[in-house]
Image: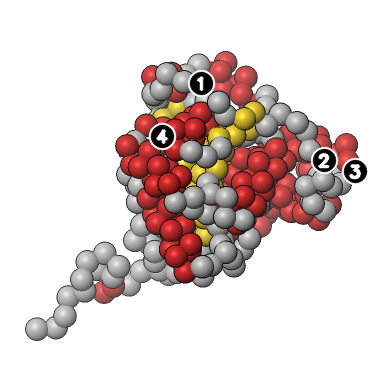
Amino acid sequence: MATRLTRRTSPEALGLSADDLRSMYRTMVTARLVDEAAFRLNRQGKAPFVVPVSGHEGCQVGTAWALERGRDVWVPYYRDVGVVLVAGMTPYDIFLGLFAKADDPSSGGRQMPNHWGSRRLGIISHSSPIASQLPHAVGIAYAIRYRGEDAVVGSWFGEGATSEGIWHEALNFAGIHRLPVVFVCENNRYAISVAQNKQMAIEDVADRAAAYGFPGVVVDGNDVLACYAAMKEAVARARAGEGPTLIEAKTYRYFPHTSDDDDRTYRSREEVEEARRRDPIRRFERVLLDLGVLTASDPEQIAAEIKEDVERRIDEAWAAPDPDPATLYRHVFAEPVDP
Ligand SMILES: Cc1ncc(C[n+]2csc(CCOP(=O)(O)OP(=O)(O)O)c2C)c(N)n1
Ligand SMILES: [Mg+2]
């Protein structure tokens, strides 16, 4: 059976300073405000397709925080705004991608929105078929082992991804070779409209780790510090050559699956309201207020500051040049050569 991580760990015991905590909080608020702005831009006809993050900020920022920029490898999925912000992408980069601009660092405007990639930051671009990034994560971990490097791969996905055969193949291979990879399942109880109990007959995805010979851990995905604690331990195990871990973070998404979905057809408003009462940002705010890391007026002021910055980055990204039509085939097809 998977381990349930329920003990409360103090930030000091986790090695997090007041600056770290403020920075984690700001990153979570940034993810939320980028999300809300992106949805608005979609409804204004400016953003073609938006995949919301709201509700997942705690598990994304908490787990990503335990990897090291410039050393480790990030294999996110389409919902991971919080992960890529921790990895070093900026809101400006994200909006360049959303508007398919020439300077979009992920693909120069070729990929769908939310398919981030950066060689500089060690973020691996994924394909849209669910779970197809998992064999990539495991292959990279194998290469790290083969070359004798000490990097760790973090890979993120939803609970729906665990219904794919390729997910099981990836975890099996990682278990056999005890590879330096951490699997993070952001369990929001739905794969678009399909509820978890229509996808699997078990309660905890983390139980599946036992079949592949490594630990599975269930963590409260709305508790950023618990997510950080689980990931920190998993990363240390991976770096020490002790193999993979599967972390299951129980969370919820507040918006529809994407800007093309209508979630009223498969879940009640009461259910969404109920989940919103466990908001990871509000929860972390209370912890930081209790610790004296934030003062009473900070949350409102920080949100206003970040909102202003997000709005500025949207304007800058909107004004940035579109790709030159002459480069239409670049990174997509072989470029035509002059006869
Ligand atoms: C192989 C494959 N099947 C179906 C889809 C369509 N699809 C896109 S997202 C999604 C749901 C995935 O749910 P989950 O893994 O739980 O992640 P979440 O979106 O809930 O974060 C599906 C079925 C796809 N992209 N690829
Ligand atoms: Mg899901």
The answer to which of marks 3 and 4 sits earlier in the sequence is 4
In the current view of this chain or complex, which residue is farthest to the bottom?
A: 339
| Residue position marked by numbered label 2 in the rendering | 10
The x and y percentages for residue 169 are 35, 42
- In this picture, is 114 found above or below 163? below
Q: Residues within 10 Å of mark 4 (few under 14, many from 20)?
A: some
Q: Is residue 313 visible?
A: no
- At horizontal 42% and vertical 18% (from top left) the residue drawn is 201
Task: Give the quadrant of the N terminus.
Answer: top right
Q: Which amino acid is tagged 4?
A: Thr
Q: Residues within 10 Å of mark 2 (few under 14, many from 20)?
A: few
Q: Which amino acid is tagged 3?
A: Gly
The x and y percentages for residue 304 are 73, 48
- At horizontal 35% and vertical 47% (from top left) the residue drawn is 132
Which label sits on residue 162?
A: 4
CA distance separating discs 4 and 1: 13 Å
| Residue position marked by numbered label 1 in the rendering | 203
| Residue position marked by numbered label 3 in the rendering | 292
The x and y percentages for residue 151 are 56, 62
CA distance separating discs 3 and 2: 14 Å
The answer to which of marks 4 and 2 sits earlier in the sequence is 2
Q: Is mark 4 in CB contact (under 8 Å) with mark 2?
A: no
CA distance separating discs 4 and 2: 32 Å
Q: Which amino acid is tagged 1?
A: Glu
Q: Quarter-wise, where is residue 288 in the image?
A: top right
